[in-house]
Image: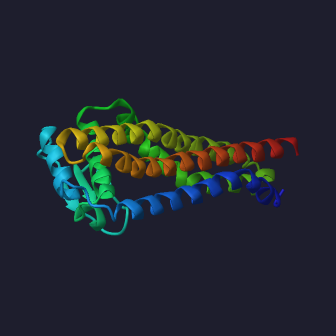
Amino acid sequence: MFFLPDITFILIMPALIFALWAQSRVKSTYQRYSRMPARSGVTGVRAARKLLDEAGLTDVAVEMGHGNLTDHYDPRRRVVRLSPGVYQSNSLAALGIAAHEAGHAIQHADAYIPLAFRNNIFPVANIGTHLAFPLFFAGLIFAQGGLAWLMDVGILFFAFAVVFQLVTLPVEYNASGRAVALLEGAGFLSRDEVAPARQVLNAAALTYIAALAVAVSQLIRLVLLRGMMRRD
């Protein structure tokens, strides 16, 4: 039984390879369009601020964060945090990302149902991500001692993490769709600049698809391991 984790690890290899490719695609696409300034000359911070103000979200702050491609919207503090390369840049990539995060803030204000659901299950999903594997493999190792039920608890916890990844997809695609429409509507992007900005956002979306693929394959792996244990 101790060799089963190594054998079943083969199940997630395709998803892991896809995830690595998706990360590479994001970086290469971002680097390409981060060198192409928008003709409007608007920076990421100005675009995000303008789009939020036009949506009536003057109370949502826009701050410069740290690192590279760490951009996100914090619904608890109602803050859009942009990485330095996005905050200060007027590139097509920066505008697309800044508008995407502003789109999340607008989703929040609009009570967008998938976002609300994702935010509500996040605490459980976060716990599940950290506890699922320790619980599962504790049950696997000590099954003969009557602790096999821990495997079922681990699978249940990880299922919440999979649901979180699943509901993330419509949230992210909706935010990207809003971003492109907002940028074009505000005149920050001309018609021929829309496609490059969309490419940046589509590349980023691939990472969420990859995360879901990895999570689903991991869940299948755990279920198969549990089934093997029962047959033994």
> What color scheme is it?
rainbow
Residue 31: percent from the left, percent from the top?
A: 40, 65
Residue 203 located left or right of residue 229: left
Residue 142 in view here = no
Residue at point 55%, 42% (across, down): 162
- Residue 116, compared with residue 218, is above or below; it is above
- Residue 158, compared with residue 19, is above or below; it is above
**Which of 216/196 is in front?**
196
**Which of 210/39 is in front?**
39
Residue at point 81%, 60% (across, down): 2
Residue 37: percent from the left, percent from the top?
A: 27, 61
Q: Quadrant of the N terminus?
A: bottom right
Residue at point 11%, 45% (across, down): 58
**Which of 5/141 is in front?**
5
Figure quadrant of residue 157: top right
**Which of 5/101 is in front?**
101
Figure quadrant of residue 83: bottom left
Residue at point 77%, 51% (across, down): 143
Residue 98 in view here = yes
Residue 133 located left or right of residue 83: right
**Residue reaching furthest front?**
192
Residue 14: percent from the left, percent from the top?
A: 69, 52
